Amino acid sequence: MMKVMSGERTLREILGRTASAYEGKLGVYARIRRRLVPDLFFADAVEVFSTSRSVVDLGCGIGLFTLALAQLLPDTRFLGIDLSARRVQTAALAAGRLGVGNVTFLQSDLRSLDVGPGFDGALILDVLHHLPVRASGQLLAVLNQGMVHGAVVVVKEIDTRPRWKWAFTYALDLAMAPRDDYGYLSLERRKAQMEDAGFKVRFARSLRSRLPYPHFVVIAERP
């Protein structure tokens, strides 16, 4: 039986403690970033990964959410992958400060992804829309082939409706990453893309937020 640290208070405490492991400007960014993603998303992720033995986080950034999940699911092994060597180093330092031992961080380009066999869980948080639609579809297909049968994937993405919320989010994305070739998809189109890649969608819903971001989550499995 996997050990799970659960409860709304525990979730918020761990998210807050994880954000505090970063220093200076990164600490400010971590605290802001933590507030941008609804707690409900993490509750969904913890429930889905509660029986997973190994989870890969694609595009993990500075490891904020990878580390939070690793603390909430101490019996699960996590691998965080990001293109930036600097972000990977930052994530590893934060893991050391927090004393989290069930997570590893790796620098790699997702466009040439090779996660290897054996993963039964995957997290993709606000990554797919930073890729052209064709590239994000290819990434999902490669991921599907590299996971064991029955593996689950949790995707948190940005919807294209309401349009004003999408425009607000797009403006912020451009400010942070002006060189990215964006490929936003609506919830329904993202579900279809995941099914085209070989996943079976188990659950999908919009996530309410006090902030003007049109979040949604899709939970799927490899048949």
Image (cartoon, rainbow, N blue to C red):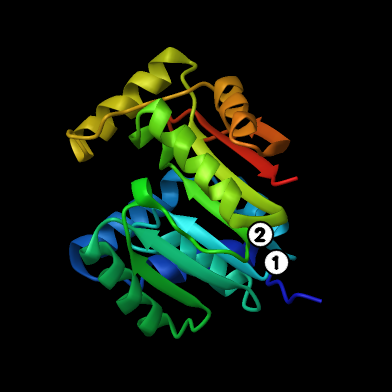
Q: Are marks 2 and 1 in contact (CB under 8 Å)?
A: yes
Left/right placement of residue 217 relative to residue 163 reads right
Q: Is residue 54 above or below residue 156?
A: below
Provide residue 11's location: percent of width, then percent of height. 60, 63
Point 62% across, 49% down: residue:
153
Which numbered tag is attached to residue 6?
1
Label 2: which secondary element:
helix
Mark 2 residue type:
Val
- Of tags 2 and 1, which is closer to the observer? 2
Tell me the quarter of the picture where residue 213 sits. top left
Mark 1 residue type:
Ser
Provide residue 33's location: percent of width, then percent of height. 37, 51
Nearest to N terminus: mark 2 or mark 1: 1
Point 43% across, 35% down: residue:
136
Tell me the quarter of the picture where residue 12 sits. bottom right
Q: Residues within 10 Å of mark 2 (few under 14, many from 20)?
A: many
So how many labels did they put on this image?
A: 2
Point 31% across, 53% down: residue:
109
Provide residue 218's location: percent of width, then percent of height. 62, 37
Query: On the rendered image, what quadrant is the N terminus found in?
Result: bottom right
Left/right placement of residue 70 relative to residue 203 reads left
Query: On the rendered image, what quadrant is the C terminus found in?
Result: top right
Tell me the quarter of the picture where residue 155 sits. top right
Q: Report the front residue among 35 and 81.
A: 81
> Residue placed farthest to the top in the image?
163
Q: Label 2, on which residue?
A: 46
Q: Is residue 207 above or below residue 8?
A: above
Q: Residues within 10 Å of mark 1 (few under 14, many from 20)?
A: few
Point 67% across, 51% down: residue:
152
Residue 13 visible from this viewpoint: no
Task: Give the distance between the C-alpha atoms of the residues marked 2 and 1, in whole angstroms.
Answer: 8 Å
